[in-house]
């Protein structure tokens, strides 16, 4: 999936903000600290509008009686990551169409997000990799993550990297397939094949495009995709706060509430981070029964399209 880096960064930054916020309940803070890796998986999951209310209710109703092994904490972490993914999608998908309209011009490419990655999406990821993760020097991603064929990794010379990538891709697909109940319980061969085909995800992202974009991006990418639409501004208070927390600061001298308010008028990344944080605070109020489903749904933008058809 493209935007893996951007989605993950929004989730991880939002988690750090949530852990310092009095507006986020103790249960959320516990699972974000204890099961952050599962939340990171949730932030890469599709279909974010389908089950958040039901999952939140499920976890809320079982929270006090939870016990090890019932996965209540893990499910809650997962759905929080899922909300952050949805926040990033809702903010950035219209931006991609604005800065690179030729990629989305034809109706047949309206769903191009699921087919490949536009140049804009790739460069957003590359900028986030540099700004948020300091090109792999900060916690989150390896410095070798975007290197073509892992050229700088000490083990690269001992392994045939390209064929190994194909082998590991097949292993991952097989592992995911084994988690599906139909894989062992379905007795009709034709139905098994049909289910397999619908649940198998293609590896449609060419990681080598990321490597080329990192090593030598076209000269107009920075202007078109980053500067003209103010994608990321390290001076934004919300970004400064997130980076300070990322680097281990205990009590940054930045007001979270004020930074969130100001972010509505600042860089695209700050706006996306603000949206993710507001989603989590809405979920927290629902979890504590301060609001009901009727108020929660509009605050999570549930049921509204990420991108309006015909809008570029």
Image: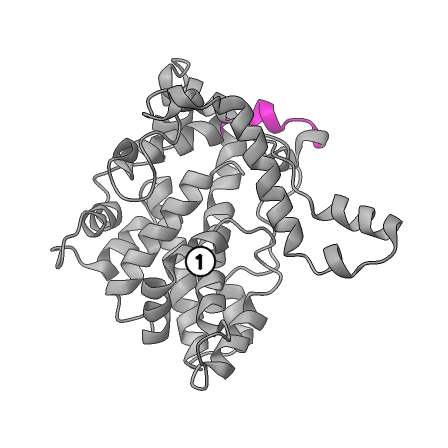
- Examine the structure image and report whether residue 225 is included in the region drawn in magenta: no
> What's the residue at 41%, 33% (across, down)?
125
Magenta region: 99-107
Relative vertical location of residue 104 with respect to residue 272 in this rendering, above or below: above
Question: Is 8 in front, or is 163?
Answer: 163
Residue 241 visible? The answer is yes
- Where residue 156 appears, as percent x and y from the top left, is 39, 23
Dividing the picture into quadrants, the one containing residue 232 is: top left
> What's the residue at 41%, 41% (across, down)?
6
Q: Which quadrant is the C terminus positioned in?
A: top right
Relative vertical location of residue 54 with respect to residue 224 in this rendering, above or below: below
- Where residue 20 appears, as percent x and y from the top left, is 24, 64
- Where residue 220 appears, as percent x and y from the top left, is 40, 16
Question: Is 271 in front, or is 60?
Answer: 60
Secondary structure mainly formed by the magenta segment? helix
- Examine the structure image and report whether residue 103 is included in the region drawn in magenta: yes
Question: Is 161 in front, or is 92?
Answer: 161
Residue 311 visible? The answer is no
Relative vertical location of residue 297 with respect to residue 141 in this rendering, above or below: below
Q: Work out which residue is located at the far bottom of the displayed protein and give it.
A: 65
- Where residue 209 appears, as percent x and y from the top left, is 49, 21
Q: Which quadrant is the N terminus positioned in?
A: top right
What residue does disc 1 label? Answer: 38
Give left or right: position of 194 versus 111: right
> What's the residue at 37%, 41% (across, down)?
268
Give left or right: position of 27 versus 250: right
> What's the residue at 71%, 31% (across, down)?
107
């Amino acid at each position: 999936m493209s935007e893996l880096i951007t989605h993950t960064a929004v989730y991880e930054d939002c988690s750090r903000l949530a852990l310092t916020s009095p507006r986020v309940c103790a249960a959320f803070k516990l699972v974000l600290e204890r099961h952050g890796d599962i939340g990171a998986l949730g932030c890469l999951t599709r279909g974010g509008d389908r089950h958040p209310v039901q999952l939140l209710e499920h976890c809320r109703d079982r929270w006090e009686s939870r016990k090890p092994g019932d996965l209540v904490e893990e499910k809650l972490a997962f759905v929080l990551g899922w909300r952050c993914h949805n926040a990033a999608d809702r903010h950035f998908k219209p931006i991609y169409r604005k800065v690179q309209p030729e990629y989305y011009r034809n109706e047949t490419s309206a769903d191009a997000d699921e087919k490949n990655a536009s140049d804009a999406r790739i460069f957003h990821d590359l900028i986030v990799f540099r700004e948020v993760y300091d090109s792999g020097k900060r916690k989150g991603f390896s410095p070798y993550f975007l290197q073509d064929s892992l050229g700088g990794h000490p083990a690269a010379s001992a392994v045939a990297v390209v064929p190994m990538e194909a082998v590991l891709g097949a292993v991952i697909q097989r592992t995911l397939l084994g988690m599906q109940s139909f894989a062992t319980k379905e007795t009709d061969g034709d139905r098994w094949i049909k289910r397999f085909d619908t649940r198998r995800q293609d590896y449609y992202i060419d990681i080598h495009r990321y490597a080329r974009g990192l090593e030598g991006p076209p000269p107009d990418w920075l202007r078109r995709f980053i500067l003209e639409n103010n994608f990321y501004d390290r001076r934004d208070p919300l970004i400064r706060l997130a980076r300070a927390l990322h680097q281990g600061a205990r009590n940054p001298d930045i007001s979270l509430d004020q930074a969130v308010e100001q972010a509505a008028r600042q860089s695209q990344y700050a706006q996306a981070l603000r949206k993710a944080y507001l989603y989590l605070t809405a979920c927290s109020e629902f979890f504590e029964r301060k609001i009901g489903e009727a108020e929660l749904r509009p605050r999570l933008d549930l049921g509204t399209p990420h991108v309006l058809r015909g809008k570029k």
